[in-house]
Image (tube, rainbow, N blue to C red):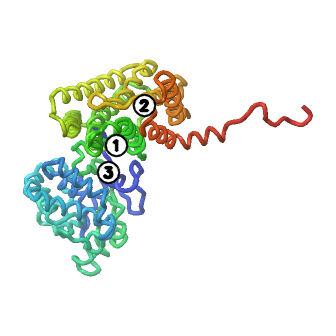
Amino acid sequence: MHRHKTCRQCEPTAMNAAPSATSSDSTPEVAIAAAAKHSGLVLIDLDETLYLRNSTEDFIDSARPGLPARLILKLLEWLKPWRLTGGPPTRDVWRVGLVVVLFPWTILYWKRRVTDLAARFGNRDLIAGLKTSARDPVIVTIGFKPIVSPLIEELGLGKAKLIASRWFNFTDRQLGKLHLASEALEPNSLNSALFITDSLDDLPLLDKCGYPMRVIWPNARYVPALSGVYLPGEYLSKVKRPNGRYIIRGVIQEDFAFWVLSTIALATQPVTHVLGLLILLISFWAVYERGYVDNDLIAARYENNPKLSKAFWNSNVCTSLWQAWAWALGTGALGVFILRSQQPVMWQDDAKWLGVLLATYGCFWLFNRLDKATRVWMYGRLQLARCAAFLVLTPAVTIGVLALGSHALARWVSYSTYRFAGSDSWPQTFPEATRLLFFVVLTIMLVAAAGGTQLNNGTALALFAWCLFRARNEIKHIVLSAKRLDRSDRPSGE
């Protein structure tokens, strides 16, 4: 999706927060005039100043193929090896180094790409001002020299002195621009220098220069590398349910846990079975998450007061429909293959799973376009898909089916209460305790109809224990807040 993108000042630290003011803050017009007239040394920042994007991110974005590069960088973000080399300032050393080592052709592709990037994102007004100056500027950046050199050439400033970080060097990034500039320039030359930058990270160098100017350029954008590559779950965790752990708590500990517990007793190869279900979960959520994207887009377009997270308006998360379906179909085929690893894989199984995905997508599409009162009745079908989609490929024990039904019903009750209550926020509905209650009631009915033999397996105990564990906090709240009317204290004399 195409929405507003944040500048660098907002992105690394506090998304959606306004950049802090400093005593050196200035306007673009004043900075351009100063750059043209200043007779002394003129220092210019590169990223989001001279070049209205981030050169490091754009270089990494040039890595091809994009999906493997994105997955490798995602793994790097989880491992955070820069904690051993000086912290976040050295993060890009690792990221760029990994791209250069694993995707060495990126360097050649970058050199071909900079012509277009410079033409599109060069700060033309500032560059024109610098070219009328009496002396060539000095470009100071913590970007990497082999990356920024061809870019500066294409910006038409090839004669400018360049101060930049070196490949695979942690020290340059740790010490920052002030250290780099002090090492490269004449002693005391900064005292009369004009320095134009956009970044709060440059405060040490701003304080050192005689004429500091911090400018936020209106067209500057920080676009994370490979943000055009789709990853399942990213929209859910960053936009739909930001600042939370919904994938772990709401998908893995809820949906997936019940998928596994309701079927594991029938699996001849438990490890393979769980792995296959996990991959099917990714396939299903690639489609289901796309329903959330569509839901937000419809709300933004047609609702008077849409309930959208702040991240919806400024996120760079990729929501490509075709990429989402590519993930869904690819992981779906892999999941079916793994589940059928001990059997011949038949095309009918792939067709069944494709049918589930298409039906879920169609149901969500219709749900998003219905009025809110009617959505209540469609919501139950969506929850049934979340809870039981996998049953077209693998059987579940009877008590497991009851648990899955209880799971879907509890969510439907919570949503219907929210809709019919007419509240702007979700009421306290205790969905975990409701699920436990449904499960117990349905189990009692099953025993009454078919006898206790249905409970003579570990699945019933595991499901009950998991439901009880998940509902523990809600049960505690219900018990502690309960009061007996016949034992309430009365005022004396009554």
Choose mark 1 or mark 3, whichever is in front.
Answer: 1
Rendered location of residue 298, percent (x, y): 35, 27
Q: Is residue 27 visible to us here?
A: no
- Residue 399 vs residue 197: left or right? right
Rendered location of residue 221, percent (x, y): 28, 49
Q: Is residue 94 visible to us here?
A: yes
Rendered location of residue 162, percent (x, y): 17, 68
- Residue 437 vs residue 342: left or right? right
- How far is disc 2 from disc 1 in space, using C-alphas? 45 Å
Judge by depth and name the residue closer to the eye, 66 or 336: 336
Q: Which mark is residue 399?
A: 2
For label 3, the crowd category at 10 Å Cα-Cα, with few meaning under 14, some 14 to 19 and many 20 or more, is: many
* Placement of 259 over or under 126, stated as above or below: above
- How far is disc 3 from disc 2 in space, using C-alphas? 53 Å
* Placement of 360 over or under 39, stated as above or below: above
Q: Which residue is mark 1?
A: 314
- Residue 105 vs residue 291: left or right? left
